[in-house]
Image (spheres, coloured by chain):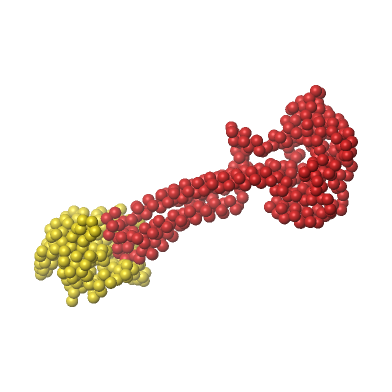
Chain colours: A red, B yellow
Amino acid sequence: MITIASVYFAVIFALAMRSMQLGSYDNMEKNIVGMFNGYIQVQDTAYWKNRSINHSLRYDNSLQHILRSDRNVSGLVPRLESFALASSGELTKGVMVIGIDPGPEDLLTQLAARVNQGNYLTPTDEGVLLGEKLAAYLQLSVNDTLVLIGQGYHGVSAAGKFPVRGLVHYPNPDMSGQMVVMSLSQAQYFLAIEGRVTSIVLDVRDRAMAGETAASLDSGLPPGLTAMDWKTMLPELVQAIESDNASGKIMLGILYMVIGFGILGTVIMMTAERRREMGVMVAVGLQRWKLALITALETLTLALIGVAAGVVTAIPLLEYLHRHPVPATGEMKEMIEEYGMEAVLVFSRDPALYRDQALIVALIALTTLAYPVVSILLLKPIRALRH
Amino acid sequence: MNVIEIQGLEKVYNETVVPVHAIRGIDLSFEAGEFAAIVGPSGSGKTTLLNIMGGLDQPSSGRVMIDQTELGRLSPRQLIRFRLDHIGFVFQSYNLIPVLTARENVEFIMQLQGRPKQERECRTLELLEAVGLGERTDSRPSRLSGGQQQRVAVARALASRPRFVLADEPTANLDSVSTHTLLDIMEKLNLEEQMTFIFSTHDVRVMNKARRVITMEDGKVISDVKRSAD
């Protein structure tokens, strides 16, 4: 019972810890990549280093046909991005202006669901959506008017007045304080750049294949255009995830050691308690190797019961935590927000997580079997009978 | 014909530090069907002699032959098999396997020998009835008194049909009624099955039942008296 309990709790702790780590990386990726960047973008080759609308590209049917021909591409989300000065009354702020195609954009980023005041945009809408923090800063609410002043295509002046259609809740605080979203047609009109976009975000079916898809598309694009996956666009995010994953693995390694010694402790205790019984069995004629095999199978069975019980308990627990992320508080909250992410601890429910952790704990339990097996093989019945 | 022959047996513990001579040059032999007691004060070497005869301990020198087989020449694996087929053990503190019932404890030995199920069941029931526990076959050791546990231990010792049974202080933890019952059972089995019984004991009641009394002191045999059966 003690062995089953030690393995049971070991599995739950290992699963909870790894689930939180993987869930955090996934959340990081979704926050930064899925929320805005997308997993693949097609741009003018000069745009990534010099984000000017002068390095825009023509969004025509032939380009769309090339992009849609890849099996992993499920949708195209065109964007026109620029910077402008936003003003309301005597308040001004530098903002990011993004022109979007409302339908495809919502499919990729679920932007409509984040509009918590007012309405989402229509394809020919003349209004704008503001990040909540930006609206608060400019003291604007729905149906108020925003003034934008900027620079359009090839240096033309861009200025306009836009009614506020809605306020958007972005989990990323930076985005919430900077974003002005308008329909693509309105943005092209405002920036005097008809028919062009600065990037096309590709919605993909299998995000794990984003790198391969980008490389394949890149080779088939017209000259002057490039396809980049999110890892190329956001190397600092990849680095942050990798370094956190490395420290997470060290923590997990420490947990495995604690688990291993916990299980070993119960196995040592079990072996010591049964030493006399084992001595009797060998004295009356049971071969040591048979006794070692029986004990190993018995302990292994107990460990597997513990693993199975642990996984069965962890499934609903992690499912609940996945659906109800734990809000981070204090220093952790500040740290997460510094990365520009929503300060919640999200738990992963990836099936591979259960398989991996169950296997690792089972392997640890299997390793601890060495102790009773060696003890039995070296057992002196005379000493064991005096035990 | 001798079942057991012991020649020039010596056992020294802690040979490299402070040597303790537990057995000092013993020569003994036992015939089939003997009912012998090895007596002597604590530390006289009774238990050590029994352990060496049972192949549970190794002598420092000398040899033990059982049915013409020298125990010292057997590999550890062969020795365990030899014990299983030739020697029955009864220990002072019973040493039954706590998770098994009386029936399973007895049957376990025959299972190790690879005996067929039907034979095992018949022999188990026969032995448990012979020791007066036919009604308690499904009781675990914790449900049995000390005397009953020791009777199960005797049944277990006989289960493999060994050439002889070694019993180390079998009555040390028993009251007088249980002691008499156990001795009567062992004497009956000795006579009926022609099984050799060798005890180490302090108990006068056991000595009185024995037909041969070997007295030890300081690792030596100081007397060896054979008596006729009454």
Residue at (72% x, 42% y) in the render: A35
Residue A20 pos. (x, y %) = 58, 44
Compared with residue A114, is residue B97 higher up or lower down, i.e. above or below?
Answer: below
Q: Quadrant of residue A160?
A: top right
Q: Quadrant of residue A375?
A: bottom left
Residue at (25% x, 54% y) in the render: B145
Residue A62 pos. (x, y %) = 87, 53
Quadrant showing the C terminus of chain B: bottom left
Q: Is residue A6 left or right of residue B23?
A: right
Quadrant showing the N terminus of chain B: bottom left
Residue at (30% x, 64% y) in the render: A284
Q: Quadrant of residue B5?
A: bottom left
How many labels, in total? 0
Residue B222 pos. (x, y %) = 10, 64
Q: Is residue B119 left or right of residue A240?
A: left
Q: Is residue A128 left or right of residue B39?
A: right
Specify whether residue A226 is in view: yes
Residue at (89% x, 42% y) in the render: A194
Compare residues B103 and A372 and report the one nearer the observer.
A372
Q: Residue furthest top?
A: A90
Residue B197 pos. (x, y %) = 20, 67
Specify whether residue A75 is in view: no
